[in-house]
Image (cartoon, grey):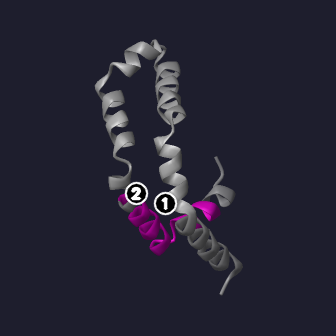
Amino acid sequence: MARIDIAERKWFRKTSAAFRKVWLDMVKRAESFDAFVKGVADFLGVSPEVVRASLPAQNWAEFQRNAEQYVEVALRKIQRAFEQHKWKRKLIEAFTTRG
């Protein structure tokens, strides 16, 4: 087995083992919503109040309140990425593609 395959397996094991708790803790933090609002406001050049009142922000807040419903979806995406060797492909691409 190539070293990159070993590294990819290690990435998957470490990511999926700690993911549920780490992801839920991160998503549920008040700072996560604030970071979302600030990021969108800075990018668009609008006030944070405009972003907070928007439908996307309301949807994000709903997602945040119900994060437990989405953790399995996120874990399935990590599993699928591992099965499709996306980590390996993207790593190789990052260091072999000239921009």
| 77 is higher (above) or lower (below) than 4 | above
Q: Kindly report the distance in space between the C-alpha atoms of the residues bearing marks 2 and 1.
A: 6 Å
Left/right placement of residue 10 relative to residue 42 reads: right
Residue 66 belongs to the span the image colors magenta: no
Left/right placement of residue 29 relative to residue 69 reads: right
Q: Residue at x 40, y 20 (%)?
A: 51
x then y, percent, for residue 60 = 36, 36
Q: Residue at x 28, y 26 (%)?
A: 55
| 41 is higher (above) or lower (below) than 31 | above
Left/right placement of residue 10 relative to residue 51 reads: right
Report the magenta stretch's main SS.
Answer: helix
Task: Verify CB contact (< 8 Å) between mark 2 and mark 1.
Answer: yes
* Label at residue 20: 1
Q: Residue at x 34, y 46 (%)?
A: 66
Residues 28 and 12: in front is 28
Identified by mark 2, the residue type is Val
**Quarter residue 96 falls in:** bottom right
Label 1 SS: helix
Q: Residue at x 60, y 76 (%)?
A: 9
**Location of mark 2 (residue):** 71
Residues 85 and 70: in front is 70
Label 2 neighbour load within 10 Å: few <14, some 14-19, many 20+: some
